[in-house]
Structure formats: C-alpha cells, structure tokens
Amino acid sequence: MDTESITDFISAHVPEIVLLIGGMIALLIVCSYIRNASSMAYKGLMVLGAVFGSLMVVLTVSSHTEWGTFALAVIAITGFTLVIRPFREVHFAAIGALMVMVLAYIFLGGLAETELGILADGWPRIVVAFIVGAVVYMVMNFAESIIKLFGKLLNWWPFLLILALICIAESLLMFSGYGSLYDFITSGQIQEIM
C-alpha cells in the first residue's frame, strides 16, 4: 500500500479507528488496574488515555454531523471517561479559587485612581479578593462534585471494561459494513447469527 491509499483509508474510517484505539486503551487500563493499580504502566496508560480521550472529545464535537449518533455517543462517553480518570482526586476548585483570588487582588490594586479606590488598599482589598475567591470556590466545588460523581461511575473498572468492549465491537461492526452496534441489535441481525 502506498502512502496515499493509507491516508485515504484512514480518512474514510476515522470513527472506526478512534473507537478501536479508544477501546483498546480503555481495555489496557482495566487490565493494568486489575494487575497493579500503583504501577507505572497503569499511570502511563492513564496519561495516554487522557490525551487520546481529549482527542476523542474534540473529534466528537468537530464531526457531530458526519458520524452516526450511537458511534458519537460511545466516542464522547469513552473520551470523557478517559480524560477524567487521572484527575479524579485533584481538587480543581481550590486551585481555581486561589488563582481567581490572586487575580482579584491584583485587579483591585488598579482601582486606586477610581471611585472604588477604597478597595485598592489594605484590608478591604484582601477581604474582597477573599470573598471573590470563596464564591468561585463554591461554584467550582459544586461543578467538581458533579463531574466526580459521573467520573466515579464511569471509571468503575467493570463499567470501563464494558465500555471498552462496546467500543471495540462498534468499531469491528463498522469496519465489516454492518453499521452501528445499535443498528445491528435493533435490526435483528444478531438473531440471525445466533
């Protein structure tokens, strides 16, 4: 095969390739988690999964009109699952609130020559920056809790295993010309095979 035919093949089968690679990465993550959750292989696979999961989410958003709905849903869920896995225990709310607090403190320092100049110095500046940071923390903590709830469910290894198998099955069915797994099951073709 020459380079042009390989490129044509890849461009004609992007969703299948994305599903297959995403499913294989998820399957490898499950296997390495079961073997040893503290191993470097597991941690490396999580990083690889986060990078490829980000690509999956970007491709889902950019190709939402060209691909089948079921394939898009599987790609999006798998992408989100792979992205969130390494960040399950990171407290983004505290980090974000601290950054906003520092930015608010800096911004308030620039108000010295305005009508709000009282907020540019001393305790008022510190108190307002703290309040802004606290509000941002509350909002981000709520959003973080919702994301972690979905992340814990989606990253439960039996669910991740099922998701990996669905990705691989969807990919193989699309490659073989049967369409989507959803179409395959609802059309009764699965009964013909059995």
Image (cartoon, grey):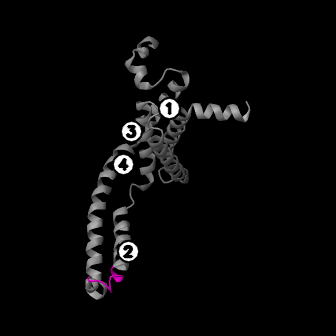
**Residue 155: quadrant of the picture:** top left
Dot label at residue 168: 1
Q: Position of residue 105 (x, y in %)?
A: 34, 79
Picture residue at 48% right of the left edge, 38% below the top = 63
| Magenta region | 108-115
Q: Amino acid at mark 1?
A: Ile
Q: Amino acid at mark 3?
A: Phe
Mark 3 and mark 1 lie on one chain; the one further toward the N terminus is 3
- Label 4 crowd (10 A; few <14 / some 14-19 / many >=20): many
Mark 3 and mark 2 lie on one chain; the one further toward the N terminus is 2
Q: Position of residue 100 (x, y in %)?
A: 35, 70
Q: Residue under circle 4?
A: 151
Q: Residue under circle 2?
A: 103
- Mark 3 residue element: helix
Q: Amino acid at mark 4?
A: Gly
Dot label at residue 152: none
Mark 1 and mark 4 lie on one chain; the one further toward the N terminus is 4
| Labels 1 & 2 near each other (Cβ < 8 A) | no
Q: Is residue 97 above or below residue 123?
A: above
Report if residue 91 is visible in the image: no
Picture residue at 63% right of the left edge, 31% below the top = 9
Dot label at residue 159: 3
38 in magenta? no
Q: Is residue 62 above or below residue 112?
A: above
Q: Amino acid at mark 2?
A: Leu
| Labels 4 & 2 near each other (Cβ < 8 A) | no
112 in magenta? yes
* C-alpha span from label 1 to label 2: 46 Å
* Mark nearer the viewer, 3 or 2: 2
Mark 4 and mark 2 lie on one chain; the one further toward the N terminus is 2
- Mark 2 residue element: helix
